[in-house]
Image (cartoon, grey):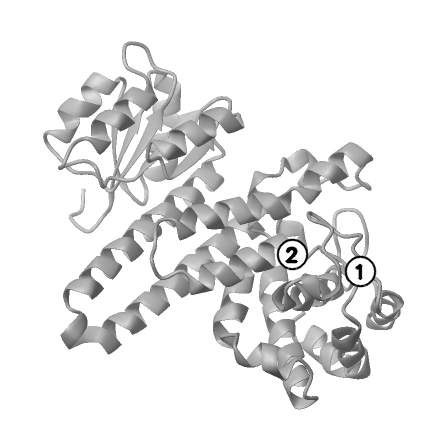
Amino acid sequence: MSINRKKIIIVDDVAINLSVAKSALSDKYDVFTAPSAEKLLLLLDKLVPDLILLDIEMPDMDGYEVITTLKNSEKNKDIPVIFLTGKIDPEHEVKGLSLGAVDYITKPFSRELLLKRIDLHVMFEMQRQELLKHNLSLESKVEEKTRTVMELQATILKAVAELVECRDNTTGDHIGRTQHYLDVLITLLVEHDKYSLELSVIDIPLFIMSSQLHDVGKVSIKDSILLKPEKLDDEEFEEMKKHTTYGVNIIKRIESSTSDNEFLHYAEVCAGTHHEKWDGTGYPNGLEGENIPLLGRLMAIVDVYDALTNDRPYKKAFDHETAIKIINDGLGTQFDPVICEVFIENHLVFKNAHETKK
């Protein structure tokens, strides 16, 4: 046991769940287990953990009662709690979040995904602590602490991006490539004096960094759909489309726990609008024309270009020329015509960027 390792308590009345979770986390964290709420409360008299994984369905005292007790305790109220459950529905999810839970994890666990989720929430708590320290020493350490927070935000975004690609690993470095294409596209728009006013009020580096979360909602899509090697049927496609709204909801939860959320606002817009289409036939909200935020219109074209030029479970990669023809066919229907024209006119720049990023 190391004083530098974060401490996690796992509470579950099923011994195998305790064993699996402890095995998945013990290489990186100091893990303590409790088979009941009573044992948890006794354990909290001896130590303060960095995170609690709390089963909902337990005898005597269920997870909702436990978290209410924790939040009413001055000593324990700030400990992040993630609910463990074998089933999830919106009503119970809302109840848990309203009581102060930071997330839900469904059972049975995927070892790798469990570790990624825990890593993510531990880093969220680290950011919260850093922000508190930052506020206490604002006058003397503004520049130093601001840099620390920005670096931590970048780390969190990278961790989330890795979590998404852990689920959807057939796309390779999709997130890194789309970031690069966004940078190139925005530079070209500025050079051609297109959307200059709109771009002038956007923190471009922050937007590009935040774009890593555009597909974060895919963590909520079943593997049988996300990784299906054939074309999705209508019902499966409707479920896949929900990754946009799932992503928005995930980001909103993160936003609610921090006061410095400009980068999360950009991420939320990206996640929610990158599948909208210029002619109003996109999803999730059927927005049309300039009613689609500029961030979403920019993300849409680089996202499609990368999808076309790389293998997916259901198709082989198209060559650059074919991808450009498909994108050109979408000018004014799927894509903003101004952005699309700049993209097409400078397609060789993107070809070079694509080949560099292979």
Residue drawn at x 74%, y 35% is: 236
Residue drawn at x 63%, y 64% is: 293
In the picture shown, does residue 231 fall above or below 21? below
For label 1, the residue is 317
Label 2 sits on what residue type?
A: Thr
Frontmost residue, 358 versus 152: 152
Frontmost residue, 235 versus 31: 235
Label 1 vs 2, first from the N-terminus: 2
Question: Residue 96, how many percent across, how many down?
Answer: 39, 29
In the picture shown, does residue 83 fall above or below 118? above
Quadrant (top left, top right, bottom left, bottom right) of the N terminus: top left
Question: Residue 116, how many percent across, how many down?
Answer: 44, 45
Frontmost residue, 336 versus 35: 336
Q: Alpha carbon of mark 1 to alpha carbon of mark 2: how far? A: 24 Å
Q: Secondary structure at mark 1?
A: loop
Question: Residue 44, how many percent across, how many down?
Answer: 15, 30
Label 1 sits on what residue type?
A: Ala
Frontmost residue, 176 versus 211: 211
For label 2, the residue is 273
